[in-house]
Image (cartoon, rainbow, N blue to C red):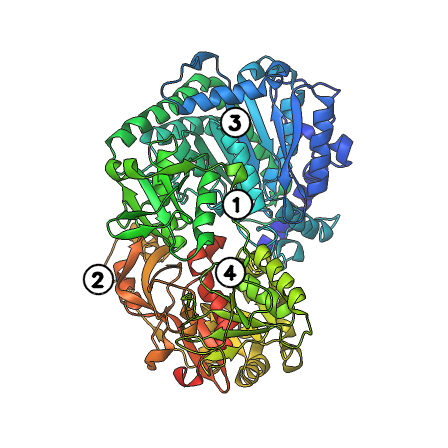
């Protein structure tokens, strides 16, 4: 009772002070401001922190500042999925703004060890990126203050001759707007900090992620989303010395700034980077001491995965700095440290922004010299490395090779195509779909991070994934090349601006007996759906065949005829040409049904139904995995999907679909009626595709006979030091690693693959026991499964020879069960086809192989 009374008094106190917050609460002492520069309130109509700024308001203010100040240039760098503008303020002296192209050109010389450059005269560049997680909004709201201060403070005018500031006010426009709309619509004028309130508990999928529910702070390296590509383009054009990354963490925390855990830094990051980060950290400590804020560093967070905003710069001669502020998640919330107001969180972020500016200003020459030295050292490293290049390609699929090459090009890395085929240690690399990345270029360390495999680590804890070896993720052949082989290769440099997949075509004439499309191409499912949508008869060959002309077709080949559409031969042919062109796949004319292997009327050929797909969302569904599936179907394959909330699941609703997708998650809220509806639906001949936690629910609900393995992760011994508990238990988490698996190429799940060796990605400890029916296990781990990344020894028995994909029969239908994530973060191109095969070919899997 006493505690409740105290909290009530504190709430009233903080509510009163909150209502009175104005710019004086935020702005540092000792500065005067140009009255011609509008304050946020003059443009938005409210004080910073009084409401959560929406994205349109944020853009409006940034434009207003740029129009009023000769220190600021406003530009739109791109658009988000929801077509919101991505914006950038470039802030510096008017003289510098008049020579931005020259400054950029000079900075490029920092990557050239032989270039002559005056380090003493070079401006320092600091990038300031706010709220990549949309519901960590104190950053974006602090950007209002940063824009005002740096545009209007009279005392910094001369300092801006030596510094260029790049201000991105909202790295995640769509997520920020989703969150701002939520908290503003639930804000009371008499604030109540009760954490049980609706304001602090967002509806699924919450505002952290982008339109497709991806964490954009994991996409700096994969660059699979427009927001990331636009952002990385800015980064590579400027090569900033310092990169600020503003985040929030749990409400009961304080304030974190880097460096993080010293033992959890990637080995390719030089030690000098840590030293400089620590030196800059002293500026933050001094500034936060001054305003009395609690803080910490060198705990919890790490610098291992290079796909994060604070780590991506570290492998490029820059200093990435993560800030984590305890989140009010609304406007005022109770916390372990007292009432936490939104203005307080904004002030801490802005204070760290100012301390970073002070560090950049005073360490300007040191930071530029560090970048110059970083790339000079790289030249020495490349000369000593026996691996002079990496070659990768696919024997059967142009698209996956293309997409990896395209990814690499985004990072200012040169990529070369082969002019002719080459054989390396018995492996054939075809000129039309193979590429070479020389190691001897400025981005050597980043290249190495993309291609290396690593299974030994200084530390066994990871804030994010421990492996991302890109050729494995794309399921490509790859090798490191020595100088002799590299010199033998005939290559041509790719131009990023003119690099695209070749359009597909129809090979043959109109009026053919049948048309055939191989399933080996990544985009074959896209074409297949378009064919089905047109109403053509689409069938799949479950056995290989060849034409009298000698053209061979493998299992999974799609056979097409007009069906009952009534098209003329010419109209049908033109539609095939259009679909082939749009889908970048080739379609072949077949002149006769009398083919070798099987004939065109064989019982080994199955008619395909058009997928009518529902993806279960909401409630306990993992929004990341749901978003990955949605993005895959919607963006890559243009296959319509219904996002079906769990509370809509009933027999009358789900009967309109023939495929239901269940991502990882908790499904208990479906209850007994939902379980019965789904079981009945599957039994009628439909296909359920499920992963992770959904498998446990299916087993517990007695829908599918799926069994799991347990491993012994219990600590042994009488006594262990209390201080190691967190590290010891954390080490047993499989945070993200790559595993070897063997694929049955004759199974419909394996159609379109040429090699039985597959690399899969897993980031959990759910281990599936193989089915006792050996035909029901199309993908299993090998006996030595770890390919790259960290795995605790106690988890190895759970994975060895375990099930990755399993098919369980339920009446006349089937459940395709995935233990691993085939669509991880949109860059795991190599296993996307396995997931699509479950959708397209689940319906043709022989029932006898599932029981």
The local secondary structure at tag 3 comes to: strand
How far apart are the alpha carbons under marks 3 and 2?
Answer: 52 Å
652 left or right of 106?
right
Element marked by disc 1: loop
Q: Earlier in the sequence, mark 3 or mark 2?
A: 3
Residue 797 x/y as whole percent:
27, 67
Query: Sequence order check: which comes first, mark 4 or mark 3?
Result: 3
**Which circle's residue, 1 or 4, is located before the other in the chain?**
1
Q: Are the residues flagged by discs 3 and 2 in contact, CB closer than 8 Å? A: no
Return the x and y of residue 824 as percentages of the image width and height: 46, 56
User: Camera-side residue: 814 or 188?
Assistant: 814
Q: Is residue 25 above or below residue 534?
A: above
Kindly identify which residue carries mark 4: 625
The numbered disc on residue 500 is 1
Front position in the image: 537 or 262:
537
**Element on which disc 4 rests:** helix
Q: Are marks 1 and 2 in contact (CB under 8 Å)?
A: no
- Give whichever of discs 3 and 1 has the lower sequence position: 3
Most foreground residue, 844 or 45:
844
SS of the residue under disc 2: loop
Discs 4/2, front = 4
Q: Is residue 55 at least partly visible in the picture?
A: yes
What distance separates the C-alpha of mark 3 from that of mark 1? 33 Å
Query: Which quarter of the rendered picture does the N terminus lie within?
Result: bottom right
Q: Nearer the viewer, mark 3 or mark 2?
A: 3
Tell which circle, 4 or 2, labels the residue nearer the N-terminal end.
4
Residue topped by disc 3: 126
The mark lying in front, picked from 3 and 1, is 1
Placement of 549 over or under 444, stated as above or below: below
Q: Nearer the viewer, mark 1 or mark 2?
A: 1
Q: Say if mark 4 contacts mark 2, CB within 8 Å.
A: no
Q: Residues within 10 Å of mark 4 (few under 14, many from 20)?
A: many
């Amino acid at each position: 009772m006493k505690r409740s009374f105290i909290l009530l008094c504190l709430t009233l106190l903080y509510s009163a002070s909150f209502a009175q917050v104005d710019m004086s609460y935020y702005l540092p002492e000792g500065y005067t401001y140009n009255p011609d520069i509008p304050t946020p309130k003059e443009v938005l109509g409210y004080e910073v922190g009084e409401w959560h700024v929406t994205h349109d308001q944020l853009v409006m203010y940034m434009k207003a500042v740029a129009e009023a100040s000769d220190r600021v240039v406003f530009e739109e760098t791109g658009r988000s999925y929801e077509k919101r503008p991505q914006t950038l303020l470039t802030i510096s002296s008017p003289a510098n703004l008049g020579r931005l192209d020259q400054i950029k050109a000079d900075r490029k010389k920092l990557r050239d060890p032989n270039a002559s450059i005056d380090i003493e005269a070079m401006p320092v560049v600091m990038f300031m990126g706010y709220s990549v997680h949309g519901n960590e909004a104190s950053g974006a709201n602090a950007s209002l203050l940063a824009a005002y201060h740096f545009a209007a403070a009279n005392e910094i005018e001369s300092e801006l001759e030596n510094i260029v500031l790049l201000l991105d006010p909202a790295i995640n426009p769509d997520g920020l707007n989703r969150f701002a709309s939520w908290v503003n619509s639930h804000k009371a004028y008499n604030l109540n900090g009760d954490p049980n309130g609706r304001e602090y508990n967002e509806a699924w999928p919450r505002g952290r992620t982008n339109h497709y529910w991806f964490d954009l702070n994991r996409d700096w390296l994969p660059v699979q989303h427009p927001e990331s590509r636009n952002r990385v383009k800015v980064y590579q054009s400027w090569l900033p010395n310092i990169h600020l990354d503003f985040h929030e963490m749990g409400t009961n925390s304080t304030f974190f700034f880097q460096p993080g855990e010293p033992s959890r830094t990637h080995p390719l990051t030089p030690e000098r980077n840590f030293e400089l980060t620590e030196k800059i950290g002293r500026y933050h400590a001094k500034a936060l001491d001054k305003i009395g804020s609690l803080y910490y560093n060198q705990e919890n967070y790490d610098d291992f995965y290079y796909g994060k905003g604070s780590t991506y710069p570290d492998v490029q001669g820059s200093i990435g700095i993560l800030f984590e502020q305890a989140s009010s998640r609304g406007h005022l919330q109770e916390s372990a440290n007292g009432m936490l107001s939104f203005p307080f969180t904004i002030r801490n972020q802005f204070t760290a922004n100012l301390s970073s500016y002070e560090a950049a200003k005073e360490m300007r020459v040191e930071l530029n010299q560090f970048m110059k030295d970083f790339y000079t050292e790289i030249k020495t490293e490349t000369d000593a490395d026996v691996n002079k290049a990496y070659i990768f390609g696919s024997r059967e699929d142009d698209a996956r090779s293309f997409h990896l090459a395209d990814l690499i090009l985004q990072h200012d890395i040169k990529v070369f195509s082969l002019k002719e085929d080459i054989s390396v240690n018995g492996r054939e690399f075809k000129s039309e779909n193979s590429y070479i990345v020389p190691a001897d270029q400025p981005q050597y360390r980043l290249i190495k991070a993309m291609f290396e495999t690593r299974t030994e680590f200084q530390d066994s804890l990871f804030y994010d994934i421990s492996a991302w070896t890109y050729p494995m993720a794309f399921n490509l052949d790859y090798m490191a090349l020595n100088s002799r082989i590299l010199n033998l290769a005939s290559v041509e440099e790719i131009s990023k601006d003119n690099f695209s997949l070749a359009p597909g075509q129809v090979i043959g004439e109109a009026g053919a007996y049948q048309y055939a499309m191989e399933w080996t191409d990544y985009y074959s499912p896209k074409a297949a759906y378009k064919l089905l949508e047109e109403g053509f008869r689409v069938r799949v060959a479950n056995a290989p065949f060849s034409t009298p002309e000698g053209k061979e077709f493998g299992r999974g080949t799609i056979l097409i005829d007009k069906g009952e559409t009534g098209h003329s031969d010419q109209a049908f042919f033109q539609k095939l040409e259009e679909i082939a062109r749009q889908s970048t796949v080739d379609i072949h004319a077949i002149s006769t049904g009398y083919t070798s292997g099987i004939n065109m009327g064989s019982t080994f050929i199955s008619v395909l139904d058009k997928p009518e797909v529902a993806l279960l969302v909401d409630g306990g569904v993992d929004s990341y995995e749901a978003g990955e599936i949605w993005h895959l179907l919607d963006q890559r394959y243009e296959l319509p999907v219904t996002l079906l909330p769990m509370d809509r699941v009933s027999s009358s609703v789900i009967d309109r679909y023939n495929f239901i997708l269940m991502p990882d998650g908790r499904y208990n809220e479906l209850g007994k009626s939902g379980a019965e509806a789904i079981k009945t639906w599957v039994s009628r001949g439909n296909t359920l595709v499920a992963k992770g936690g959904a498998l446990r629910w299916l087993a517990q609900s007695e829908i599918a006979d799926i069994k799991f393995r347990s491993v012994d992760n219990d600590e042994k011994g009488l006594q262990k030091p209390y201080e190691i508990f967190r590290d010891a238990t954390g080490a047993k988490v499989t945070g993200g690693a790559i595993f070897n698996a063997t694929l049955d190429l004759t199974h419909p799940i394996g159609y379109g693959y040429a090699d039985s060796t597959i690399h899969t990605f897993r980031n959990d400890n759910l281990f599936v026991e193989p089915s006792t029916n050996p035909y029901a296990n199309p993908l299993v781990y090998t006996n030595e499964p770890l390919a790259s990344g960290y795995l605790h020894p106690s988890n190895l028995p759970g994975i060895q020879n375990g099930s990755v994909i399993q098919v369980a029969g339920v009446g006349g239908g089937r459940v395709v069960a995935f233990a691993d994530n085939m669509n991880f973060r949109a860059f795991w191109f190599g296993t996307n086809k396995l997931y699509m095969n479950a959708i397209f070919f689940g319906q043709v899997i022989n029932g006898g192989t599932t029981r």
